[in-house]
Image (cartoon, rainbow, N blue to C red):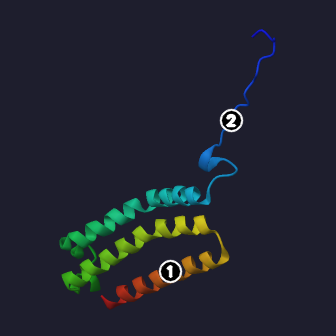
Amino acid sequence: MASGKQQQKPEPELHGGVLSGGGSSTLWGWLIGLVVFVFVAVPISIAVRFATHPATQSLFGGRLEDATSGAYSAFWWIVALFLFAIPVLVGWGVAKLSGRTLAIIVGIVAVFFIAILILGQLF
């Protein structure tokens, strides 16, 4: 240090990742999808439990009790698959975040809702 001047290197800027102002939309999609998955994890496990244990059919007296065990199991597997798809759809929607993406998600949810109503009436 003979010259008396010290060279200071500029410190690199720290980027905060997902939660910073410039976070990646893909990472936001993953984060929101994970949060939604946490909320639907219990209904997914219940639907899988109903699908894999045909003895639970007696819990739903009336028309569901008269349905065949195959139809009962298929109904709950379809519900479980659609519940599992919800976090994926929400994460994808957040990552894309456009009007077209929102319309696609609303359409898929509407088809899911109508399919569950129709399947429920078949029993």
Image quarter in which the N terminus is found:
top right
**Residue 106: x, y in percent?**
56, 79
For numbered disc 2, what is the local secondary structure? loop
Looking at the image, residue 120 lies above or below residue 32: below
Residue shown at 59% from the left, 64% from the top: 95
For numbered disc 1, what is the local secondary structure? helix
Residue under numbered circle 2:
12
In the shown orientation, is residue 117 left or right of residue 51?
Answer: right
In the shown orientation, is residue 46 left or right of residue 37?
Answer: left
Residue 62 visible: no
The part of the image, by quadrant, that contains residue 69 is bottom left
Residue shown at 23% from the left, 76% from the top: 57
**Residue 27: x, y in percent?**
56, 56
Q: What's the amino acid at mark 1?
A: Ile
Numbered badge on residue 50? none
Asked if the residues shown at circle 2 and circle 1 are in contact, with their CB atoms under 8 angstroms apart, the answer is no
Image quarter in which the C terminus is found:
bottom left
Q: Nearer the viewer, residue 10 or 4?
A: 4
Q: If you read the primary sequence from the N terminus, does the residue marked by circle 2 or circle 1 appear first? A: 2
Q: Residue furthest front?
A: 2
Residue 25 visible: yes
Residue under numbered circle 1:
108
Residue shown at 53% from the left, 55% from the top: 31
In the shown orientation, is residue 17 left or right of residue 74?
Answer: right
Q: Nearer the viewer, residue 100 or 113?
A: 100
**Residue 79: x, y in percent?**
36, 75
Mark whose residue sits in front, 2 or 1: 2
The part of the image, by quadrant, that contains residue 71 is bottom left
